[in-house]
């Protein structure tokens, strides 16, 4: 039984989105030293991005594929912005903002770099979605 949103298969049913090697995702999470939610892991084990939907105007990165991916952007944010290891950067920058997953709470945030990053680091930024599952429903409108 899948824990992903019901209609996600309809949205991402094309062959180009099917993940070939699940070990790549597991290895990236080990390198990043995080334990993401079951929903997050199932999504990236099943699907390969990047993704673009107009419902949430950010390019959702793949975990490991392409040069710009969740792993590389997360490492950059840790080095350049002091993000603690619990945060994963999920998107490309759009209008000076990014999507960030807190792997401890499973909250997803829209973080702008005009003060939102500081609020996130202080634990004062309000979550945009209460879980990665809720984020997927909004992002893919399913």
Image: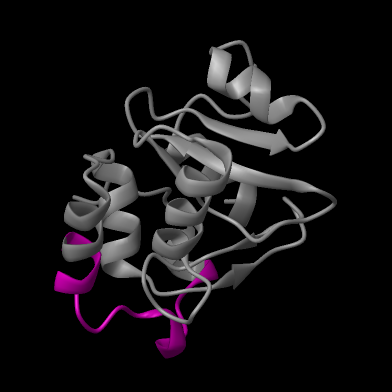
Residue 73: image x %, image y %?
51, 59
Residue 51: image x %, image y %?
58, 70
Task: Relative to 98, say whether 58 is above or below.
Answer: below
Task: Relative to 34, say whether 72 is above or below.
Answer: below
The picture quadrant where one finds residue 28 is: bottom left
Residue 106: image x %, image y %?
39, 30
Identify the residue at image location x=72%, y=50%: 56
Q: Nearer the viewer, residue 137 or 122?
A: 122
Indicate whether residue 2 is drawn in magenta. Answer: no
Identify the residue at image location x=40%, y=74%: 48
Task: Relative to 13, say whether 44 is above or below.
Answer: above
Identify the residue at image location x=30%, y=78%: 19
Horizontally, is 38 left or right of 83 in the view?
left
Residue 141: image x %, image y %?
64, 51
| Magenta-tinted stretch | 11-26
Horizontally, is 22 left or right of 74 in the view?
left
Q: Nearer the viewer, residue 122 or 47?
A: 122
Indicate whether residue 21 is drawn in magenta. Answer: yes
């Amino acid at each position: 039984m899948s824990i992903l949103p019901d209609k996600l298969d309809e949205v991402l049913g094309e062959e180009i989105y099917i993940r070939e090697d699940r070990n790549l995702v597991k290895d990236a999470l080990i390198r990043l030293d995080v334990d993401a939610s079951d929903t997050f892991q199932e999504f990236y084990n099943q699907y390969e991005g990047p993704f673009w939907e107009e419902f949430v105007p950010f390019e959702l990165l793949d975990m490991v594929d392409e040069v710009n991916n969740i792993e590389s952007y997360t490492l950059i944010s840790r080095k350049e912005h002091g993000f603690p290891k619990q945060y994963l950067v999920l998107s490309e920058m759009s209008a000076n903002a990014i999507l960030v997953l807190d792997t401890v709470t499973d909250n997803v945030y829209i973080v702008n770099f005009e003060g939102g990053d500081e609020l996130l680091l202080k634990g004062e930024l309000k979550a945009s979605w209460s879980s990665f599952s809720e984020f997927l429903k909004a992002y893919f409108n399913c």
